[in-house]
Image (spheres, helix red, strand yellow):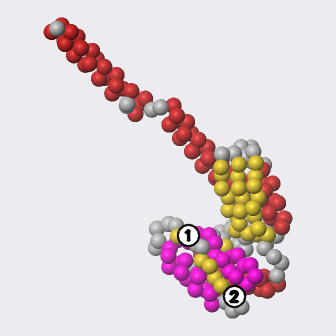
Amino acid sequence: MRKELRSLFVMLLLAIPMVALANSPAAQPQEEKKQRSETKYREKLAKEVRHQLVMLPWYSVFDSLEYKVEGDKVILSGQVTRPTLKSDAEAAVKSIEAVSSVVNNIEVLPLSPMDDQIRRAVYRAIYGDSGLSRYSIQAVPSIHIIVKNGNVTLEGVVDSEADKNLAYLRASAVPNIFSVKNNLIVVGNGK
């Protein structure tokens, strides 16, 4: 009986390092590694989709393009002022090698001289402000002005909550507007 206990004890001592080795970080399951590479792949694809959309020649401050990557399918959404920009965005994303299909849910804003006038007035009000003018020096300014039937929506990103509120106040001060919706996202250090 003593021999049996001793041999059981020795086997237990030999088994402990193997169990510890199986749970060590060096022995991560293959599935976890695959999941990390899949996440990296998705991030790289999303970055390429964004790059293609931003590089569109007629993409302006009066358009808002958004996308969602689901595997190798890309779903486009947002609003544009030109019908050709909708089709150009779809073609640009389809040209990416890793994309198998594109769902184009981009809305083309209605033609309206009044909306065009409001777009220009809101642009001058926001980007003419000394506190917000730094956002206008980019190729595609980060504050997008979407106007549909007299209703204004601010889309994009700003550095601080103060900039977000200032953009809203400047847009709200423009005459002939029915409403202003502030969808700006605060990123950065929040100066």
- Which amino acid type corresponds to the residue marked 2 in the rendered image? Ile
Residue 49, given in percent of the width and then of the height, sits at 69, 53
Instruction: Specify start and end residues of the magenta stretch as a single range.
Output: 145-173
Residue 67, given in percent of the width and then of the height, sits at 68, 58
Judge whether residue 108 can be spotted in this image: yes
- Which amino acid type corresponds to the residue marked 1 in the rendered image? Ile
Q: Nearer the viewer, mark 2 or mark 1?
A: 2
Tell me which numbered mark, 2 or 1, is placed earlier along the sequence: 2
Frontmost residue, 13 versus 38? 13
Residue 175: in magenta span: no
Q: Which residue is mark 2?
A: 177
Residue 61, given in percent of the width and then of the height, sits at 70, 72
**Quick check: marks 2 and 1 in contact, CB under 8 Å?**
no
Crowding at dot 1, Cα within 10 Å, few <14 / some 14-19 / many 20+, comes out as some
Horizontal relation, residue 45 to residue 114: left or right: left
Horizontal relation, residue 178 to residue 29: left or right: right
Residue located at (63% from left, 90% from top): 173
Q: Which residue is mark 1?
A: 185
What is the quadrant of residue 85 in the picture?
bottom right
Residue located at (80% from left, 63% from top): 86
Horizontal relation, residue 80 to residue 190: left or right: right
Frontmost residue, 138 versus 96? 96
Q: Tell me the distance, in whole angstroms, between the alpha carbons under discs 2 and 1.
A: 22 Å
Crowding at dot 2, Cα within 10 Å, few <14 / some 14-19 / many 20+, comes out as some
Residue 165: in magenta span: yes
Q: What quarter of the picture does the N terminus occupy?
A: top left
Residue located at (62% from left, 87% from top): 172
Residue 135, given in percent of the width and then of the height, sits at 61, 73
What is the quadrant of residue 129 in the picture?
bottom right
Tally of numbered tags: 2
Q: Secondary structure at mark 1?
A: strand
Judge whether residue 120 can be spotted in this image: no
